[in-house]
Amino acid sequence: MSQDAGGDATTEGDLRNTGMSLKHDREWDYELDRIIEEIEEKDAKKVGLQFPEGLKRRGPAVADDLRELAPDDVTFMLSGQPCYGACDLDTFLMRRTDVFVHFGHSPMKNSEKIIYVPLFSNVDVFPMMEEALEELPEDDVGLVTTAQHMNRFPEMKEWLQEQGYEVHTRRGDDRLTHEGQVLGCNYASADIDADQVLYVGGGKFHPLGLAMEHPDKKVVIADPVNNVVTVADTEKFMKQRYGAVHRAMDAEKWGVIFCTKIGQGRWETAERIVDENENAYLITMDEVTPDRLRNFDMDAFVNTGCPRITTDDGPQFHKPMLTPGEYEIAIGNKPLDELSFDTFHGTW
Amino acid sequence: MSQDAGGDATTEGDLRNTGMSLKHDREWDYELDRIIEEIEEKDAKKVGLQFPEGLKRRGPAVADDLRELAPDDVTFMLSGQPCYGACDLDTFLMRRTDVFVHFGHSPMKNSEKIIYVPLFSNVDVFPMMEEALEELPEDDVGLVTTAQHMNRFPEMKEWLQEQGYEVHTRRGDDRLTHEGQVLGCNYASADIDADQVLYVGGGKFHPLGLAMEHPDKKVVIADPVNNVVTVADTEKFMKQRYGAVHRAMDAEKWGVIFCTKIGQGRWETAERIVDENENAYLITMDEVTPDRLRNFDMDAFVNTGCPRITTDDGPQFHKPMLTPGEYEIAIGNKPLDELSFDTFHGTW
């Protein structure tokens, strides 16, 4: 899926490590003062706190700190629901609290009630960026990163300029908060006028999507979390996807998943598939897991929810799991060579 | 946990088999005509179908049958959320459909939008009832059963009367639809004037709860699903529960679970615990699973949601998991001998 490019890099990065559970010791800035201010301003009595999976463990200590600062009559509630992004708000908790704090992701959509507290990585990105230079021979370079490293983005850009590059960046679409930011399902910030793009961040899922979405560009990965520089290689990924599509070609019964998470619903896509295929069944759920789908006696599934589930978790499902685009290929509506990465646009 | 009473019964019933996944071949009556009538009357365009876990597999075929009978422009949606009772409605699907059909449980609360379709077992209950007679030496007997066998309840009662018993039955409280019905969390229908109660149904969880809730009564189990007659024995269960309570006595940090499922929320109970214990943290979630709780670094948990999760699934959690009553014992508010089964009252 990737090739080692850096001379000193002896360990391959974990493909699944998207930077959520990092190996570094760190202090996060939970922006307690901003939260307390909001609680006081709104005279809030119930406050919901939601953390992504890798940081849930920190929740009780953050609640402790907030309880010390907040008025006595405020009840803090921790979301125990799985959370994988700003697309994945605990709407139950949000509705039932006066202030709802979402930690670790940048805003996908602003709302009066939600406080987004981004948690920025304090890892030094420059050693790996330096190592990445030898994979970036041209004068123009695109620069993208994830929410965790967004705070260093201006510095990264400046540093690349100092190395003599013309650095191309853009904000992308509504789903993205910041210039240069990518999500696992959105790479619009890399629609820039350069043939090489430097991705700074942990893991390989994001740069892989980026390389799939922009097959004409060379995507160089400077991973400061796993200390490795690589070049995104879509070949293995493509083989996996073609394998899934081929296995689904004989499918008679299709399960069409409509994900009920606030930022992951593509209703029109799901509805169109079931309207046009009488052997397709619409299945709604929030968490899309192998266990839940095993209950349905289908030959294959199309997931209109989070693309990462389809591609990254795909092999764990008991039947082939395709993206909407792959489904069109499997049923013969589109040629095989139109296989592409599934991306998400818009908010909710 | 139980002792074999029937002479011919050579196999012990599976403790976890509560009758949801039965061994018998059967035809269910899905009441398609009633559903179609409602769809037409309401001119419904979106129809949600929810099945309990053991019957989810039947969903697509039921959807097929309904599609043949319904107008062409109706879209059927299958709930992929786990479902363990009428307390556990897929509220997302319910809100987003014009007609919502809940299969396999009896109504906990009626609503304009919900059609409850009970699915009755066609297993013959009388051979095991006959075998149970030798464990019922007194003249008076209480009779209870689960939703699956409710359709035979009048026959069962009549049959017992023919055997010379005075049969005591009652409806219980609001949470129960039918006279003689028990839930895993409610045994109010057994508050009757007899020292022995006959439970007709699959599994041992219900009769165990019944015996715990009514320790003065002998609870005889006629299990027509596993073909076995036993007498409920709470000793092993009590030992397990005391074990969990003891292990939790040293706990400093408590996770207090508030379940967000529509019929499983006990907000006042949860709030009282966190208000009175500064080392208690309120955690909200729908599915209460070992995986989700592993994310929280607590010493013990109190589950204010479904009692079955606490007691039946309890040993699977990484830390002791107590009912609200057991929590009071563990923190020293109540004496050890007040340990009792956790029951639920009211609807939602």
Image: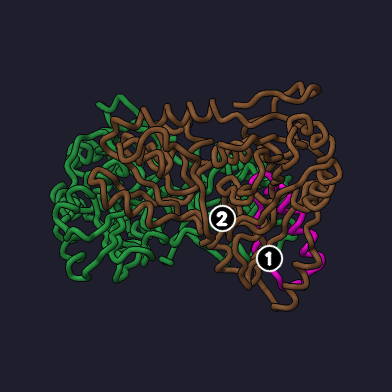
Chain colours: A brown, B green
| Residue A319 placement (x, y as % from top left) | 38, 32
| Residue A19 placement (x, y as % from top left) | 69, 41
Q: Is residue A58 magenta?
A: yes
Q: Nearer the viewer, residue B141 or B187?
A: B187
Quadrant for the N terminus of chain B in the image:
top left
| Marked residue chain, label 1 | A
Name the residue: 43% across, 29% down: A242
| Residue B107 placement (x, y as % from top left) | 31, 61
Q: Amino acid at mark 1?
A: Ile
Name the residue: 22% across, 55% down: B166
Residue A241 lies left or right of residue B33; in this view the side is: right
- The residue indicated by pointer 1 is A115
Q: Nearer the viewer, residue A124 or B150?
A: A124
Q: Earlier in the sequence, mark 2 or mark 1?
A: 2
User: What segment carries the magenta color?
Assistant: A48-74
- The residue indicated by pointer 2 is A87
What separation in Å lies between label 2 and label 1 (alpha carbons)?
14 Å
| Residue A216 placement (x, y as % from top left) | 57, 37
Name the residue: 77% across, 37% down: A224
